[in-house]
Image (tube, rainbow, N blue to C red):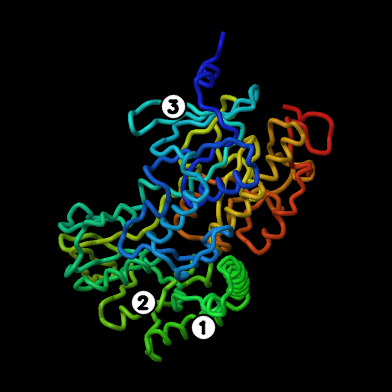
Amino acid sequence: MATAAAEARRDATHVDVLIVGAGISGIGSAYHLQDQCPGKSYAILEMKDSFGGTWDTHKYPGVRSDSDLYTFGYRFKPWVGAPIASARAILDYMGEVITENGIDQHIHYGHRITSAAWDSASNLWTIEATRKADGAQVVFTANFLWMCQGYYDHETPYLPNWPGMANYKGLLVHAQLWDPKIDYKGKKVLVIGSGATAATVIPEFAKDAAHVTMLQRSPTYFYCSENKNELADRLREVGIDEPTVHRVVRAQIMHDQDVITKRCIAEPDVVFEELKMLVRAFTGKEDFPFEPHFTPKYRPWQQRLAFCPEGDIFRAAVAGKLTVVTDELDTFTETGVRTRDGTEIEADIIVAATGFNLLMMGGIPFTVDGQPVDWHDTVNYRGMMFTGVPNMVWVMGYFRASWTLRVDMLGDFVCDLLKTMDRKGAHRIEVALRDEDRDMALSDWIENENFNPGYLMRGLKLMPKSGDKPEWRHNQDYWAEREEIPRIDLEGSEFLYDGVRAGSKAPEPA
């Protein structure tokens, strides 16, 4: 008698590769798949009604990239605009990639995945989803699953349960849920938070609001720069073609980022003084006061360094449009908030720029041969595969470099992996600890001293474990991985093909 799983597969749409998510990761991965493995059929399932992921979710004033587009853009598609770009410009760029490469015909919008089940008997993933248009339950099967869904909850942001919130008579909204119809002109606006979102939204509010206040528990590092790339402008001036401009500028930026990342560890105090010099230059104030509101308690790049084009947030402060308060929130009041030291802040609109809720694998329930997958029980292979979970790669980008650099890199890896499976005639690929890894110490996915933003620290128990060897860590170091990942030996003993460890002749014991 046919099992329920077999019945579901019988009516399913089958593809060789199923990509989850039509954001920056999913679209880039689709390009690499059809470019490098043109014989593979594929589909993209997207929960939203449009592509873009993060850039479709966030609609707060001034929403823009906090990475330069020469490295955030794909390596195969030259970027020709300003280095820091608006969400609209990024969506237009992604739309061009989709249209120019015929990716649109593979995207299924409005499909919310409700389960993902691997079956070793058939070597297939069965993906069940609800179709938004009519509420129908649809089923896809795939030989390989490419998870490009991002890392946070797009529907429920992180909002602390502050005392007295029900007392507030004004408008309280999380930045992630901002409605562009909200009118803030002439209003007193309070932004709670000091990270990249606050750095983006505050200068835009300051243009038309009566006044803006930023309430922060602790300060953030800001990097001020003009929103242009002199090397790109010079190369264009002398007639260099755009693909070459893109490649050369991209290489220069990545070199510079490598240098500053290492310097943040080796000489953090010197780097901070240089960041201060930039603030003074853009504000024209040699005596700009950094204490207490702009002196963080951690070293640069232990959390994300917020980009500040033209020093805009500091110029808003100097112009009297922005007041910064560094303290903990004690309670909401009818007219605003009161801090621990008793400061009353009145506001017509309060915007919580308090970050994300981490959401591992989009919150999709996974099973392998009928057993639920707890990602925290798995060990992560180079930040992309998991012990005990076959035929799947997960795209997790970089925190200190552009996310898309890893999208391109893993695109090459997955395509090489698929070609290797075809050459071997293998239907299943998975990673497993080797004999030399059996007693390896396991720890959290990332170390606190490496990178410790709140959303990541809150969600570590959702994440896989890491080992103390390079193969079993996501080291967040693009400059090391760009050498290491292309040299991965797919015949290495950490890989099992159809249950047989590479280099051996016997299948692994169950």
In primary-sequence order, the first of circles 3 and 1 is: 3
Task: Give the percent coordinates (x, y) of residue 224.
Answer: 44, 77
Asked where in the image residue 34 lies, by quadrant, the reply is top right
In primary-sequence order, the first of circles 2 and 1 is: 1
Q: What's the amino acid at mark 2?
A: Asp
Helix, strand or loop at mark 1: helix
Helix, strand or loop at mark 3: strand
Which residue is identified by label 3? 138
Q: What's the amino acid at mark 1?
A: Glu
- From the viewer's perspective, is 191 left or right of 388? left
Task: Give the percent coordinates (x, y) of residue 424.
Answer: 77, 34
Asked where in the image residue 405 lies, by quadrant, the reply is bottom right
Helix, strand or loop at mark 2: helix
Neighbourhood count class around disc 3 (C-alpha, 10 Å): few under 14, some 14–19, many 20 upward: some
**CB of mark 2 within 8 Å of CB of mark 1?**
no
* Residue ID at (34%, 28%): 135
Closer to us: 295 or 105: 105
Quarter of the picture containing the C terminus is top right
In primary-sequence order, the first of circles 2 and 3 is: 3
Distance from label 2 to label 1 (Cα)? 17 Å
Task: Give the percent coordinates (x, y) of residue 264.
Answer: 58, 74
Neighbourhood count class around disc 1 (C-alpha, 10 Å): few under 14, some 14–19, many 20 upward: few
Asked where in the image residue 350 lies, by quadrant, the reply is bottom left
* Residue ID at (22%, 69%): 345
Quarter of the picture containing the N terminus is top right
**CB of mark 2 within 8 Å of CB of mark 3?**
no
Which residue is identified by label 1? 274
Neighbourhood count class around disc 2 (C-alpha, 10 Å): few under 14, some 14–19, many 20 upward: many
Above or below, comparing residue 8 to residue 491 in the picture: above
- From the viewer's perspective, is 94 left or right of 506? left
Which residue is identified by label 2? 312
Q: What's the amino acid at mark 3?
A: Val
